[in-house]
Image (tube, rainbow, N blue to C red):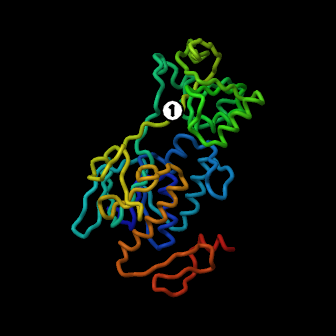
Amino acid sequence: MIKTDILIIGAGPTGLFTVFEAGLLKLKCHLIDALPQPGGQCSELYPKKPIYDIPGFPEVLAGDLTKNLLEQGKQFKPGFTLGERADTIEKLDDGSFVVTTNKGTKHQAPIVAIAGGLGSFEPRKPLIDNIAHYEDKGVEYFIKDPEKYRGKKVVISGGGDSALDWSIFLADIAEEVTLVHRRNEFRGALDSVEKVKELKLLGKINLITPAEVTALHGNESLEALTIVQEGENILLEADHFIPLFGLSPKLGPIADWGLEIEKNAIKVDTLDYQTNIPGIFAIGDVNTYEGKLKLILCGFHEATLMCQSAYKIINPGKKYVLKYTTVSGINGFDGTRKEAPKAVVQAIN
């Protein structure tokens, strides 16, 4: 039996940052993730994707963000159970929880923090008859290594942030980038939309809207595709077709834990992101509440407030106030002045 203070289900960015915030409060963490390595989608789906909305980083690759978060939390010595899925949960008489994985590994903790991102996920695929034939032969749903597209003709389809960001990024790598979207308006960040329009004017991106890819052509691998725009067929040469329509999330076994679910997400109280079951929290993309934004930085905020509440549950009656992490010391558990944790000292010096 693995015992810890906070059992984190999901080792994506939000789960990894929870390790640091809990460590500041002298709480130990153990993480469970079905993937074989930490980082969640940032490691598994798009390690080379640039992320632009992390405070203090004008741009950081998803894989580098994972490395930085692991380094930040390393001093607090978290435990990991990787390559195993959290399957069942049981509440013991003492109020703690036992979570068992699909491989039978048992974990016990007074606090469970579900940080499973979108849960288990599959890409949303366009309805093109022969698309399965070209999967891994020119059709990809995720971009792991942008160098794969160097000097190639790439068609990206979609209207969200991923489609916009990758179109911008690959404009300097691929021989030709074409962005196809079924509407004239995009769902992504306004700044990204403006950048795509600028690159179109510079001749670095072909923008075809409103339009839709309807057919794929080629022998052993993708060679061309058909785009329908305003009733007319356009035959376009292409080495790669990347439809970025988002992911179809599934909570998996967690959906059977008695939690209040709304639209495939876990409802929480925004006071501390606790679920309808006391002691079980949900943070990051896996939760839902009025005004929810599925951003990594919002997950960091939720993790911070969750850890404060977890401390009070684990240490009833004890007072601990952490107001700032930019001073040379922080208030200790007994109210006296203590040395700051290593991470804080490093930040100061």
Q: To which residue does mark 1 refer?
A: 245
Can residue 172 be seen?
A: no
Residue 275 picture quarter: bottom left
How crowded pointer 1 is (Cα within 10 Å; few <14, some 14-19, many 20+) is rated as some
* Residue appearing at x 44%, y 67% in the figure: 307
Residue 49 in the image: above or below residue 132 = below
Residue 233 picture quarter: top right
Residue 213 in the image: above or below residue 73 = above
Residue type (three-letter) at the residue carrying disc 1 = Phe
Please indicate whether residue 345 sits to the left or right of residue 254 in the image. right
Please indicate whether residue 237 sits to the left or right of residue 127 in the image. right
Please indicate whether residue 308 sits to the left or right of residue 73 in the image. left
Residue 331 in the image: above or below residue 97 = below
Image coordinates of residue 170 in percent, x first then y, are 68, 34
Image coordinates of residue 151 in percent, x first then y, are 72, 26
* Residue appearing at x 47%, y 68% in the figure: 22
Image coordinates of residue 165 in percent, x first then y, are 63, 39
Image coordinates of residue 198 in percent, x first then y, are 74, 34
Residue 153 in the image: above or below residue 46 = above
Number of marks drawn: 1
